């Protein structure tokens, strides 16, 4: 039996960019306690969370199209053939940006002859590109051959597979923390690095910014907290535009829902067709994302 050769792909699922508590803390003027007829408070919150998730999905689709990318930090893997440039580097242009880190790199003449780069200290990571020294694989640098025998030329394509972190960190506290704490236990520390600033977004006591001083697995060391925070509170490094966009798009979706619920079976309210009540919110929300679009879809 022939074994199928499976391509390396990465598929991600959207996660909400704000919590229900964050949305309800905004001055939206929209009721959130009647989204499910005769529902319990928990059912109302669950329904609101569905609209927030849909808004977050719309944000990802608007920015990345059908590429499968998302705004939150993820680790993605790509495989392609690339030639060494004249400066002795492999120049990579990842499909998802901003690039935060290169986590692994392998190269070879084909899939059965791949070698991993064991030292990433000479890799150059920029927001939209990665430069990887080619000499560990080709024996050739910008200064000429580094070994005797045949070496790869700039005309010869090498197969490379690499994994990289891209996007903005988004997670939540997996355990409560007290004022003065210098450690956060979070659900996913992808994209969190020493020196970065995170925001603990807590509608109960107010947001606070912390600076990362170290990361071990999903435990993040930080500058001391000012407030107590419960488990489930969002922690992120998202631009403010993402938070505002998610609020606006969620508002637009909820307004559309309210209008549809008020229509008669003939699709009319008050005997006349009305406009889209959520259009202004949707336009404002997507407008906030214009500077982050990688694939134009709208």
Image (cartoon, helix red, strand yellow):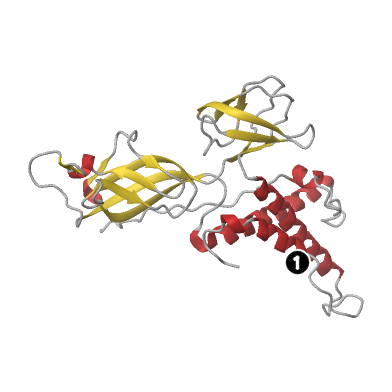
Q: Quadrant of residue 168?
A: top right
Location of residue 3 with respect to 146 vertically, above or below: below
Residue found at x 34% / y 56%: 6
Q: Position of residue 178 (x, y in %)?
A: 71, 22
Q: Does residue 262 appear left or right of residue 72 in this picture?
A: right
| x then y, percent, for residue 43 | 79, 49
- Residue 181 point in image, percent of width and height: 66, 20
Closer-to-camera residue (284/105): 284
Point 81% across, 67% down: residue: 277
Give the mark count. 1
State the residue at coordinates (67%, 53%). 53
Q: Residue furthest top?
A: 180
- In the visual, does 118 lie left or right of 280? left
Give the residue at mark 1: 279
> Outermost residue, left direction?
149
Location of residue 229 by image quarter:
top right
């Amino acid at each position: 039996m022939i074994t199928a050769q499976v391509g390396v792909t990465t598929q991600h699922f959207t996660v909400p960019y704000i919590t229900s508590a964050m949305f309800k803390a905004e001055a939206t003027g929209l009721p959130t306690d009647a989204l499910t007829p005769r529902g319990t408070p928990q059912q109302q919150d669950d329904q609101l969370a569905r609209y927030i998730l849909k808004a977050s999905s719309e944000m990802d689709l608007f920015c990345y199209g059908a590429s499968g990318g998302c705004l939150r930090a993820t680790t993605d893997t790509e495989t392609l053939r690339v030639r060494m440039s004249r400066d002795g580097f492999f120049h990579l242009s990842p499909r998802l940006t901003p690039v935060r880190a290169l986590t692994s790199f392998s190269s070879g003449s084909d899939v059965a002859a791949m070698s991993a780069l064991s030292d990433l200290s000479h890799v150059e990571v920029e927001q939209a590109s990665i430069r990887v020294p080619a000499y560990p694989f080709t024996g050739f640098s910008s200064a000429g051959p580094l070994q005797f025998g045949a070496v790869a030329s700039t005309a010869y394509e090498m197969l490379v597979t690499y994994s990289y972190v891209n996007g903005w960190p988004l997670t939540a506290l997996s355990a409560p923390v007290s004022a003065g704490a210098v450690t956060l236990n979070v659900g996913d520390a992808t994209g969190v690095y020493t020196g970065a600033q995170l925001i603990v977004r807590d509608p109960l006591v107010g947001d606070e910014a912390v600076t990362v001083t170290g990361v071990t697995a999903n435990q993040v060391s930080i500058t001391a907290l000012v407030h107590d925070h419960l488990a489930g509170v969002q922690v992120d490094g998202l631009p403010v535009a993402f938070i505002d966009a998610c609020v606006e798009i969620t508002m637009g979706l909820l307004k559309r829902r309210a209008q549809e619920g008020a229509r008669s079976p003939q699709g009319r309210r008050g005997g006349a067709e009305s406009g889209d009540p959520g259009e202004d919110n949707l336009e404002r929300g997507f407008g906030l994302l214009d500077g982050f679009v990688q694939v134009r879809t709208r």
